């Protein structure tokens, strides 16, 4: 693993009003420039983990470090330049053009009271082109399908240009062609030195794409390691509690679960 | 058309209307006054300078504050159905005015102060109750507590009306609730000017940020904003100005709800353009309504009735009309 950019030290967290701990004494590290997938059953705390790293949720115990500095010590705008979030879905009430919407990603780079200029528009336009929606820049964002919306949210994060991108099931609504677009974007982000952390329910994608994988089980047991070492049929069977087999063919892993 | 150009046209239209309105009224006869009259008729000059000018300027402040604050509220609550008075502010002002009419007589300054005081109290109580509600997200909590506080004030208002002297106090309360600018003087204008102007300037300068505050909380946070802190700053700024203007005008409905819709329809949602558009359209709308109110009939029609009537009709026409293409 590369030198770590994110480090979680003995994190404990539970939502107020709920008895159970979502995370218990969780420690892990993410290497700089790595692509890392988080896998685990629904409701196990994958999104919670992303929100903790973002600073949006605060752990009850333990510290989260970004570049070896506690994230609570960062100013808000500094954090905005360093970490971006691509939510799984987003509630959009008002009509914006795609370009205007994606431009919101420039916020941490602007001075206070400043609004985005021509250079920012170029960056946003390029981000839209990267997700294959460059020609739709003028379309209203309220008229998008679920998959298109996901692409736009990713474009906004590219516009934000952070050092770490956190993506919450970025491919859940996408067809295979668009999944491939995202996979290629994540790969090129890695080449640019950006650290990528995403949650997914697709072990195959994790296996082909990721430097390391985090497996979260319901028993709060967390495993982290190289995808080849960790993504075994045995481990997946254990965390999902259904029999899973991994079949290798043509140098790729396929999982069989039904 | 370029949005910036559209804003400039809107501004020129507003200036034209102000000039027109200055010479419109019922002196010397209903309709337009010849500007030359100002040089010969001392009464005409007095009328224009001491009555029409403060009244027109106040209507501009009223309209731009209500519409601008309405847009701020709708963006922050991500809800196109909220208006600037809904956090207990309008009902608080109404209660405050009725309270003053009954207990302090009909001193205008006391009615205005009491309306402004209870309007701000409405916001403060809504805010503190929202913080104590253990249910739902921050926005839902504010909306719920705003509804409850408004209901409490309107119950109080009902009680005031019930207790009021039906010959003298009740009509005065009713009149205040219908809204109007007939009593406005330079003094009123200068009292509300600082708060209103400050709020308009702050909102205008910070307007692009409203786009970010409209996003889901965690997304806004991830872009480097503190959503709750900034939302409270905007809410307070918008509400303080709303309380100030309605303390003078009484309850003027629909401007804060409808004009932001019109602004978004013609300028799209990006607050860089929709905020100044809403402010100017609000000013135009209130100015037109108030000019009609004081010109068409010898007994003045309360402004609130006209804004509701014209606003609702305009709303229906625009929303059922053909799709307007929003330029870039």
Image: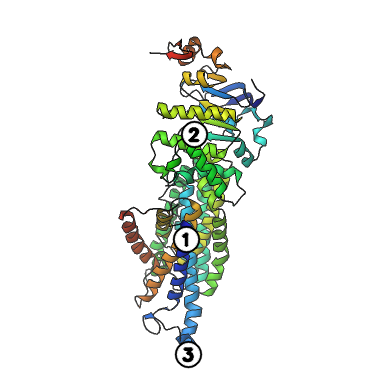
Q: Residue A252 at what x, y percent from top left? A: 48, 14
Q: Are marks 1 and 3 on the same chain?
A: yes
Residue at 59%, 43% (x, y): give it. Answer: A108
Residue at 51%, 30% (x, y): give it. Answer: A185
Label 2: state its secondary structure. loop
Tell me the crowding category of disc 3: few under 14, some 14 to 19, or many 20 or more residues within 10 angstroms, Cα based.
few
Kindly identify which chain the residue marked by label 1 belongs to: B
Mark 1 or 3, which is nearer the eye?
1
In this figure, which colouring scheme has been used for the structure? rainbow
Kindly identify which chain the residue marked by label 2 belongs to: A
Which of the pair A9/B12 is nearer the observer? B12
Which of the pair A225/B165 is nearer the observer? A225
Label 3: state its secondary structure. helix
Give the spatial CA distance, label 1 vs label 3: 40 Å
Determine whether, in the image, residue B225 is placed left or right of residue B60. right
Provide the residue designation for mark 2: A87
Determine whether, in the image, residue B61 is placed left or right of residue A108. left
Tell me the crowding category of disc 2: few under 14, some 14 to 19, or many 20 or more residues within 10 angstroms, Cα based.
many
Query: Is A147 located above or below residue A200 in the figure?
Result: below
**Residue B202 seen anywhere in this rendered image of the structure:** yes
Give the spatial CA distance, label 2 vs label 3: 70 Å
Q: Which mark is residue B312?
A: none
Number of callouts: 3
Residue at 54%, 21% (x, y): give it. Answer: A210
**Residue B96 seen anywhere in this rendered image of the structure:** no
Q: Residue A211 at what x, y percent from top left? A: 57, 20
Q: Residue B324 at what x, y percent from top left? A: 36, 54
Q: Which mark is residue B5?
A: 1
Label 1: state its secondary structure. helix
Provide the residue designation for mark 3: B40
């Amino acid at each position: 693993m590369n030198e770590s950019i994110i480090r979680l030290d003995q994190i404990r967290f539970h939502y107020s009003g709920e008895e159970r701990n979502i995370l218990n004494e969780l420690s892990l590290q993410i290497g700089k420039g790595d692509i890392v997938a988080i896998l685990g059953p629904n409701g196990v705390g994958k999104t919670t983990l992303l929100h903790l790293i973002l600073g949006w949720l605060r752990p009850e115990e333990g510290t989260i470090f970004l570049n070896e500095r506690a994230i609570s010590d960062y100013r808000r705008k500094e954090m905005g330049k360093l970490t971006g979030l691509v939510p799984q879905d987003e509630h959009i009430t008002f009509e914006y053009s795609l370009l205007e919407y994606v431009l919101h990603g420039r916020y941490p780079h602007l001075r206070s009271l400043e609004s985005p200029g021509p250079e920012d528009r170029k960056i946003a336009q390029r981000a839209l082109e990267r997700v294959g929606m460059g020609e739709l820049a003028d379309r209203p964002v309220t008229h998008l399908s679920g998959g298109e919306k996901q692409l736009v949210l990713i474009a906004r994060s590219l516009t934000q240009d952070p050092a770490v991108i956190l993506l919450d099931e970025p491919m859940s609504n996408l067809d295979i062609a668009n999944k491939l677009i995202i996979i290629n974007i994540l790969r090129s982000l890695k080449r640019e030195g950006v650290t990528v952390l995403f949650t997914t329910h697709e072990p195959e994608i994790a296996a082909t794409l990721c430097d390391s994988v985090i497996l979260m089980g319901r028993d709060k047991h967390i495993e982290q390691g190289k995808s080849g070492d960790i993504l075994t049929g045995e481990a997946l069977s254990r965390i999902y509690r259904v029999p899973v087999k991994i079949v290798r063919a043509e140098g790729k892993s396929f999982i069989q679960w039904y | 058309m370029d949005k910036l150009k559209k804003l400039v046209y809107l501004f020129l239209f507003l200036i034209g209307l102000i000039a027109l309105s200055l010479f419109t009224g019922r002196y010397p006869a209903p309709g337009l006054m010849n500007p030359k009259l100002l040089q010969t008729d001392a009464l005409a000059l007095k009328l224009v300078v001491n009555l029409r000018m403060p009244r027109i300027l106040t209507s501009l402040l009223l309209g731009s504050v209500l519409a601008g604050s309405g847009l701020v509220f709708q963006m922050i609550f991500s809800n196109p159905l909220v208006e600037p008075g809904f956090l207990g502010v309008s009902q608080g002002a109404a209660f405050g005015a009725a309270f003053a009419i009954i207990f302090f007589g009909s001193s205008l300054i006391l009615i205005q102060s009491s309306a402004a005081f209870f309007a701000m109290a409405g916001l403060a109580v809504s805010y503190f109750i929202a913080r104590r509600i253990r249910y739902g997200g921050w926005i839902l909590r504010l909306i719920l507590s705003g509804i409850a506080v408004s209901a409490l004030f309107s119950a109080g208002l009902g009680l005031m009306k019930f207790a009021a002297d039906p010959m003298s106090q009740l009509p005065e309360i009713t009149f205040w609730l219908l809204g109007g600018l007939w009593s406005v003087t330079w003094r009123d204008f200068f009292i509300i000017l600082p708060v209103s102007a400050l709020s308009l300037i702050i909102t205008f300068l910070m307007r692009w940020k409203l786009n970010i505050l409209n996003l889901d909380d965690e997304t806004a946070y991830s872009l480097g904003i503190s959503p709750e802190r900034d939302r409270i700053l905007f809410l307070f700024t918008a509400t303080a100005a709303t309380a100030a203007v309605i303390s003078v005008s009484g309850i003027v409905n629909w401007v804060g709800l409808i004009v932001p819709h019109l602004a978004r329809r013609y300028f799209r949602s990006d607050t860089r353009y929709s905020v100044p558009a809403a402010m100017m359209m609000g000013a135009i709308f209130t100015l037109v309504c108030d000019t009609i109110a004081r010109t068409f009939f010898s007994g003045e029609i309360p402004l609130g009735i006209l804004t509701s009537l014209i606003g609702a009709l305009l709303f229906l026409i625009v929303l059922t009309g053909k799709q307007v293409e929003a330029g870039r």
